[in-house]
Image (cartoon, rainbow, N blue to C red):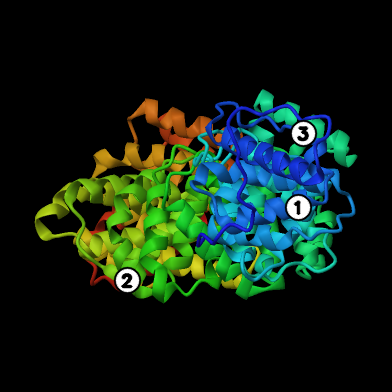
Amino acid sequence: MEHRASRVPKLACVEEEEEEGPGATPAQETEEMVCKFMKRIREEETSVTGTVVRAYPPIFKTKSSAALLDMLVEEGPSSPKQVPAMVRYIHQWLEANEFPEYNLYRPLLDLTEALPADVVMALLRVAPSCDRAATTMWKTIMCSCRTAETAMLVLLDVLANWPEHSTCTSDGDHTPVLALAATVVMWKILQMPYVPHVVTVHFPRLFVHLLFQVLFSTLDMPEVADTFWKGCQQQHGLATDPNSFAEQTLKALLCRLHYEDVVVAMEDKRGWDTLLCADTHHCAVGMLAREMHHASKASCSAVAFHLLGLLRKDMPCGDLAAMAFLVEILDCLNLSECRDSVLEVMSKNLQSECREMRRLALRGLLVLGTSVSAAIRMWSLHERLVELLQENDSKMLRMTMVLLSRLFLCNGAPLASPLALQLAGALLPLFDNDDSQVQACSMFIFREILYFSPEEEKKALKSYVHQSLLPLLFHCHDENQHVAEVSAALQDSRETLHSSATFLHRKDLQHMLQLGQTWKFSEGLLAEDRSRAAEHVRQALRYLESPQEPLREAAIRFMGMAGRRLRGQQQELQLICRALECLTKDRSSAVSALALETLHVLLAIQHGRYSTMQRLQDQLRRAWRTRPRLSGLGCLLCRMTEEES
């Protein structure tokens, strides 16, 4: 602010105030008043207790007081430390003159234009509860094109920090209620007949900060802030807590900017109540994001961009809410411009100790993963994703599997041996997962591992491939409620089973699969190595409890075949018989009948009652394996096997 020549008459102002004579003239009274006024300003500048508001009715009630304030502002403060005193005196003058004849708006705007941060911070300190005089000052500042932009930026900075603002005022004072006081100011501004244009311009930042104010005032309410709020309640007739008030201000912002449908939709879904609970705040934020997404993608894009910037920094406690909102509106961003930033944020939070944050990060990565270039960049995350397969969370497991599938599909890069083994071991149990998508993804990735594993590392994978054969064979009998899913599941199982047989160089098993003879596959699997029969039996036991009837039937038939191979191994035979005995009371009559028949055969074997016909059947099976050219034996074996069943 430029210093202009003083309009005050030259007065002999001395430090010590002289007592007025009984015959003092009006001119002498004016001169003395000016001296007192300027002396008080200097005292306010150097006072350590400058936060105390002093009232001087004799000064503020005179006609010349407003002119003196105008003159002081026009002169300009000799230092920023004088600004709080000037703001304080303007506020006191407006308090003393409810309907002023003299307009102080111009000097207030001049002072704010010159030193916006000092004026805004001083006004928040002088009148934190935003009384009548302060409201008048705020309206003047926020409705002027000279001061609105800079003042709004300062207010947003204050709102961004809870409970204390990081920047002290020009006289060095920290006030721990500034963020809450700034919320009161915004509430007052939003009650104006016409919302200042600057509110619309800075909607994204204001929206985010008010959203976080709800959370912060729920989590942390210092004693001094609580005391301040009780004063606000009494002055403005508020019957709400600070977090409810912040939510009320947020609603007012949305309504004034024509997002009434969002407010109503949140009300219908009880989202506003959920927002006031610290444990469910992020869920309500996600709901609000979805409603905002329906209302305006343009606004959501600006909000998402601001949230992205906040998440790249260390946030004290609002990162979960910020992530919940960002993930819901991620498609509103121009990812070609900020893909790297989004990937950085999602990757960082994939390591979070908070499960919900990891889940949100996975959702964000799935959105990014639809782009081939982004999926290639995410390949470095595959080690972390493999670790997430151990999570006891069905939603996270599904997202992790889908994301891993995309990474393999887009990259196809060889895996290092330790990771390949770790991943193969984690995938095997997922073949039996209830989620069909998890099943399909696990089988796809397993095939990819077998295909891309270097030759020198394939030996280490063989044990996992052997373990995969029986589960994949059983899943060739999968059924589902939807025909399309049945077809896809069978195809995945057969393709993966064929890949495993190829990996193990079992041409006989490959040939059986090509001919669709899955029943022969079981025989071939058991015939390979008699010592593996017991291992296969233990694998098959869990499929006897499958909710799918075809899988139970397939497991029973396999038990019957394996039992014949285990003749003489009483412990293993008893294990099979006990399991089959339980199935004789199965809810399915077909399953119970098959279990009873198989049990009868195995008990006969266990007690040594093995008929001549059964011996002949075994001899014919061995002959078929050694003399495949005898095609007639194949037909005979088929009929004998059908008769056994």
Q: Which residue is mark 2?
A: 410
Q: Residues within 10 Å of mark 2 (few under 14, many from 20)?
A: some
Image quarter for residue 19?
A: top right
Q: Is residue 499 above or below residue 119?
A: below
| Residue 385 locus on image (x, y percent) | 37, 50
Q: Comparing marks 3 and 2, which lies closer to the viewer?
A: 3
Label 1 to label 3: alpha-carbon separation: 15 Å
- Seen from this angle, which residue lies furthest top? 223
Question: Viewer-proximal residue, 251 or 297?
Answer: 251
| Residue 336 locus on image (x, y percent) | 40, 76
- Seen from this angle, which residue lies furthest front? 23
Question: Viewer-proximal residue, 412 or 251?
Answer: 251
Q: Amino acid at mark 1?
A: Ala
At 35% from the left and 65% from the top, the residue drawn is 340
Q: Amino acid at mark 2?
A: Cys
Question: Viewer-proximal residue, 399 or 117?
Answer: 117
| Residue 153 locus on image (x, y percent) | 57, 58
Q: Residues within 10 Å of mark 3 (few under 14, many from 20)?
A: some
Q: Which residue is mark 3?
A: 55
